[in-house]
Amino acid sequence: MVAEKLLQKEQPNSTAPLVNVENLSVEFRSKTGNVQAVDGVNFSIHQSETLAILGESGSGKSTVALALMGLLPKPNGHVNRGAIYFQGRNLVDLEESERRKMRGEKMSMVFQDPLSALNPVYTVGFQIGEVLRVHRRMSRSKIKKAVVELMEQVKIPDAKSRIKDYPHQFSGGMQQRVIIAMALALQPKVLIADEPTTALDVTVQAQIMQLLKELQRTEKMGLVLISHDLGVVANHADRVAVMYAGHLVETGKVEEVFRNPAHPYTVGLMESLPTLNKNTSRLVPIKGSPPNLLTPPKGCPFHPRCPIAKDICRQELPELTEVASGRESACHFYKEVLQHG
């Protein structure tokens, strides 16, 4: 349940962004046609800032993360337009060998399913240490010491003995901590967390998010939090980017977007959640289903499900427009949405 009062957060560092994503578009080729999974996405990530990317399953959130990391499935997936600048360097233009050097070192990722991300036939100590062997070429004794320190950093108890355990000997929450330790081994500037609390109970979920917050503060990392859990986003993000059918439909500070959305899709997300002050026990779902991206609708992709759609919505794709300082919306009628919700 989303907290009724959003937590006050520290203001992110106002220096130049670590990452600038400009007009990013990702296409997947298939036998039945080409799918534009991400279309014209723009955002930035600053030092010590948490940017949350929201949306339903299939909205393009994880595809954006894979594009940032250079891990789109080949040969079908590719960036067909746009740029990803990391500290001024366009990652899209880099050779695979250069991208490989940057993974873990500059930008790292926590995958959403820890059990499938970990190899069941190797110990967790070996898997965490592999990053250090490949990138740092450290001696065996130094690697062991570093792995124990990383496991202790992510609050895995009795790390010295558990370094020899296998993934199946860890609970889901502890497996997620192992994945986080691997992602933090090289002290990246940017950490991408793709559904880091999926399938975890609320207590472990809170521990994982608190851990990420503490590590972010000490390491001054930029954090990209990909989630459909609005409660987690409300309590931990600084800014939010809402995606629908591969498009950004709204961006802004999390408090402002949650309290007064400027896009009908964001309104629908908020209305579909239980809150303490609602007098009804029934939730209000968003009618319909996300579009088939093989044959996307003309105009605004949300118009078939939108309660206020008009003729212009069925004909013209709305641009992401500044609606207030630091806020943008891709809706032809954002003024009415802001006024009436």
Image (tube, helix red, strand yellow):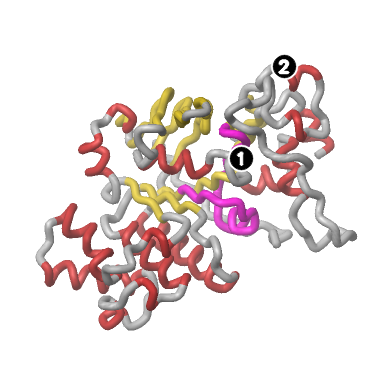
Amino acid type at image mark 1: Val
Circle number at residue 242: 1
Q: Is residue 174 magenta?
A: no
Q: Position of residue 123 (x, y in %)?
A: 27, 71
Q: Is 11 on the left-hand or right-hand side of 141?
A: right
Quarter of the image with the C terminus is: top right
The quadrant where residue 316 appears: top right
Is residue 18 visible in this depiction of the protein?
A: no
**Against 124, is 52 above or below?**
above
Instruction: Please give the range of residues in magenta.
Output: 224-246
**Against 218, is 73 above or below?**
above
- Nearest to N terminus: mark 2 or mark 1: 1
Amino acid type at image mark 2: Gln
Quarter of the image with the N terminus is: bottom right
The quadrant where residue 125 appears: bottom left
Q: Position of residue 286 (x, y in %)?
A: 76, 44
Q: Nearer the viewer, residue 118 or 7?
A: 118
Instruction: Give SS at disc 1.
Output: strand
Q: CA distance from mark 2 to mark 1?
A: 22 Å
Instruction: Give SS at disc 2.
Output: helix
